[in-house]
Image: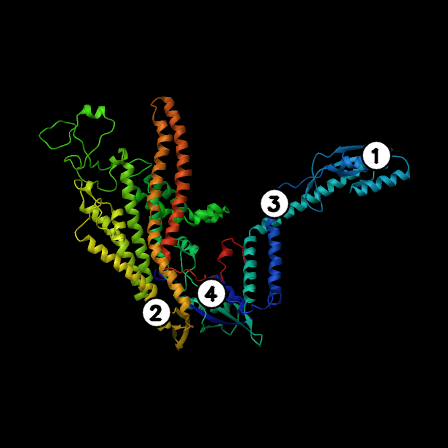
């Protein structure tokens, strides 16, 4: 798991490949997919490279294979059959013409021949295939009667102009019968040839279908290998190819072994050489993933590829992302449905992968099956905490509230008679009265709140405070992760004048607010809660240094001194980040420079180690001061706006719960209101509508909304505290995409 927390250590290496073994070596590297080739011929035209002819031959073979594959697709499709023309009695000129040209053709004959011709035409019912384009066209057969050679010449020219096909027709009936018999014989012979050709074509395609997939892969691999070889340089002896590749340091042994296999397969006696290089270029970022972590890594990479060796947010996102989603989507029933759908995709993933579904929406959902699974599991947990299942509460342990309907004047209890319960629709329970509140519910929200008129008021207060607590903890964790980046890149100035002021600023203000929330929950009980001061007003007065507000009493002794001290400490952190750090950087500009490109220093033939070289660039005080001012203002204002942004956890959670309750009340409640047989039939129909609306609205639409908001909280509020995301991705040369059926170059 170590490589998941930080990107892989990369190196630039130089490959020396013998000409006779270069193809096999590159092919082996494509199989393992651990190296990214650099183009050493950027100024050379594509058509002037050494292996351009091999690439062209591969493209031609690929085209032929696609034709074979398309022929296999239509193997069982019926071929269009040509029909015989109707038997005619007599004509001087006969032929066929496109059906849409008949009216114009007839008018032209009438005008040119001045009405001295007689035209008869009939439509051919079946469509014919155009031999030039292959399209299906509809034609009509015609006969033109006329007298004289002059009209004959005019008629033929008109037929040629309208692209009509003319056919000879004998004048005597006997000759026409003999010609028709000859045509029928030729048609039978041609049909026999076509049938035999089609049978042979089917046998060839059926035989080729068993290996066409293998041919596709081989040709695509060959094309990819030759394309990669075009990225290499050729030495002056024309016997060696030189390539430069980025590769992970931990995979150097595997790469050496692949080169050794390629040399052995080619039969070459000269081994290929892999030599690590010294470079000042920034390496690409590479994070190893598996089928479980790849979805979360894609969420992080969608925001931006991390800088080289920067802290990777993906391992923390595996937990925090589905949890924050579940805070907004908390419902036991909906969580169970989502978990079951994700489990289906996970348990049948091998079969679904083999089916190769091309639907883009399904492919996207299938790629995030493990994300959906965790979101469903966490939604079950938060649904238990909210005690919410399809907008209804589960009374598993009995309510902590109780009412004894009896009259006991000697006891200081709230006592209601049965008459009181019958005559009053709404009654108020006072937790301060002994016997009404017997203790907290074992886990989650007490089910009695589901029938309380002030349910929304109670949940508003609870979920709003919960959102602030979760948001502050999440942001403090993000700021804490920046410390590990500063320690790894050896930036002491960023630790003392960056991380420490940032963490102190946030903890002294918003961390203190979280402490006040917990203090108020613990310090006030049912008897004193009515006189509890407002946290919002207290927090505003803290910034205004207003401690004489008669409407809002202090929460504890010494509150004025502690809050004044915290505000002064927070204000003192601002000049530390804004002024002190800039002045120190001006005096010693090399202290805060990012570590330069990694350089390899060989100590012995057995191994080497990485040394980070600091690039002492020219220091521009104005640019640094402006950049530091922007960063300080953005961070300080962001602490306020980001904390407020986490209130979306509260808003979406309440919206989801209320929408679920509305759906139950307006749909499902109608089917449960009747107890007759007709009501049972209506309940069956209404339940179907309720299930469809639940899946479409509450699962898909609300789930997508919560997903997008959780995505924003991670990208903006969490990752911007420690994640730069301005690197470029490691793109190794690999055949995996071809084996998966994606035929891109």
Q: How far across and how far down the image is residue 218, in percent? A: 55, 58
Find the distance from the CA under tag 4 to the CA under tag 3. 42 Å
Along the line of sight, which residue is nearer the eye, 394 or 259?
Answer: 394
**Residue 111 position by quadrant:** top right
Q: Which of marks 4 and 3 is nearer the N terminus?
A: 4
Between marks 1 and 3, how big is the CA–CA gap?
Answer: 48 Å
CA gap between label 4 and label 2 equals 44 Å
- Element at label 3: loop
Label 2, residues with CA under 10 Å away: few <14, some 14-19, many ≥20: some
Of the numbered discs 2 and 3, the one sitting upstream in the chain is 3
Which residue lies under the disc numbered 3?
75
On screen, residue 4 above or below 147: below
For disc 1, the marked residue is 110
Q: Is residue 53 left or right of residue 533?
A: right
Which of marks 3 and 1 precedes in the sequence?
A: 3
Res. 583 mark: 2
């Amino acid at each position: 798991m170590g490589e998941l927390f930080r990107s892989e250590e990369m190196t630039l290496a130089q490959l020396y490949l013998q000409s006779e073994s270069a193809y096999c070596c590159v092919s082996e590297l494509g199989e393992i997919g651990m190296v990214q080739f650099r183009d050493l011929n950027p100024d050379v035209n594509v058509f002037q490279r050494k292996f351009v002819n091999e690439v062209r031959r591969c493209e031609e073979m690929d085209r032929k294979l696609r034709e074979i594959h398309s022929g296999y697709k239509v193997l069982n499709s019926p071929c269009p059959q040509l029909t015989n023309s109707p038997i005619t009695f007599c004509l001087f000129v006969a032929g066929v013409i496109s059906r849409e040209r008949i009216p114009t053709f007839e008018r032209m004959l009438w005008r040119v021949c001045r009405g001295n011709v007689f035209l008869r035409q009939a439509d051919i019912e079946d469509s014919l295939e155009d031999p030039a384009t292959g399209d299906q066209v509809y034609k009509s057969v015609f006969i033109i009667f006329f007298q004289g050679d002059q009209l004959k010449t005019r008629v033929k020219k008109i037929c040629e102009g309208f692209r009509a096909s003319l056919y000879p027709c004998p004048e005597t009936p006997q000759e026409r019968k003999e010609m028709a018999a000859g045509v029928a014989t030729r048609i039978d012979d041609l049909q026999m040839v076509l049938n035999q050709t089609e049978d042979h074509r089917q046998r060839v395609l059926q035989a080729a279908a068993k290996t066409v997939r293998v041919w596709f892969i081989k040709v695509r691999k060959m094309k990819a290998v030759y394309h990669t070889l075009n990225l290499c340089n050729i030495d002056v002896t024309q016997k060696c190819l030189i390539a430069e590749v980025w590769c992970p340091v931990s995979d150097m042994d595997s790469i050496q072994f692949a080169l050794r296999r390629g040399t052995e397969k080619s039969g070459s006696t000269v081994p290929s050489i892999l030599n690590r290089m010294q470079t000042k270029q920034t390496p690409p970022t590479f994070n190893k993933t598996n089928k479980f972590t790849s979805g979360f890594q894609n969420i992080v990479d969608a925001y931006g590829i991390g800088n080289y060796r920067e802290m990777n947010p993906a391992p923390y996102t595996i937990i925090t992302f589905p949890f924050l989603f579940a805070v907004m989507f908390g419902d036991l029933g909906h969580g169970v449905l989502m978990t079951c759908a994700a489990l289906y995709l996970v348990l049948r993933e091998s079969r679904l992968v083999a089916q190769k579904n091309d639907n883009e929406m399904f492919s996207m959902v299938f790629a995030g099956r493990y994300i959906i699974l965790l979101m469903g599991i966490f939604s079950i947990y938060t649904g238990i905490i909210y005690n919410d299942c399809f907008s209804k509460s589960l009374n598993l342990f009995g309510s902590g509230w109780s009412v004894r309907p009896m009259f006991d004047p000697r006891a200081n209890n709230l006592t209601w008679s049965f008459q009181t319960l019958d005559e009053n629709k709404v009654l108020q329970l006072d937790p301060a009265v002994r016997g009404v509140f017997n203790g907290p519910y074992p886990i989650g929200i007490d089910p009695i709140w589901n029938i309380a008129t002030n349910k929304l008021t109670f949940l508003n207060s609870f979920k709003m405070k919960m959102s602030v607590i979760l948001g502050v903890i999440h942001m403090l964790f993000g700021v804490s992760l920046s410390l590990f980046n500063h320690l790894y890149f050896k930036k002491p100035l960023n630790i003392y004048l960056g991380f420490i002021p940032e963490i102190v600023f946030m903890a002294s203000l918003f961390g203190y607010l979280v402490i006040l929330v917990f203090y108020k929950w613990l310090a006030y009980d049912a008897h004193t809660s009515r006189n509890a001061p407002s946290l919002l007003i207290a927090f505003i007065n803290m910034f205004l240094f207003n401690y004489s507000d008669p409407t809002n009493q202090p929460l504890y002794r010494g509150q004025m001194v502690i809050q004044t001290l915290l505000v002064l400490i927070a204000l003192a952190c601002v000049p530390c980040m804004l002024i002190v750090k800039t002045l120190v950087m001006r005096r010693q500009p090399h202290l805060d420079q990012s570590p330069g490109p990694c350089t390899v220093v060989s100590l012995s033939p057995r191994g080497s180690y990485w040394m980070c070289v600091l690039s002492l660039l020219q220091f521009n005080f104005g640019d640094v001061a402006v950049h530091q001012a922007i960063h300080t203002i953005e961070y300080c204002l962001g602490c306020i706006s980001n904390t407020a942004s986490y209130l979306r956890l509260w808003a979406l959670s309440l919206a989801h719960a209320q929408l679920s309750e509305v759906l139950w009340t307006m749909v499902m409640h109608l089917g449960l209101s009747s107890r007759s047989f007709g009501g049972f039939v209506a309940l069956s129909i209404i339940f179907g509508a309720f299930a469809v609306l639940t899946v479409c609205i509450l699962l898909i639409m609300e789930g997508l909304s919560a997903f997008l908001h959780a995505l924003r909280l991670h990208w903006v509020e969490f990752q911007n505290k420690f994640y730069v995301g301005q690197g470029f991705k490691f793109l190794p040369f690999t055949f995996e995409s071809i084996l998966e059926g994606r035929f891109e170059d």
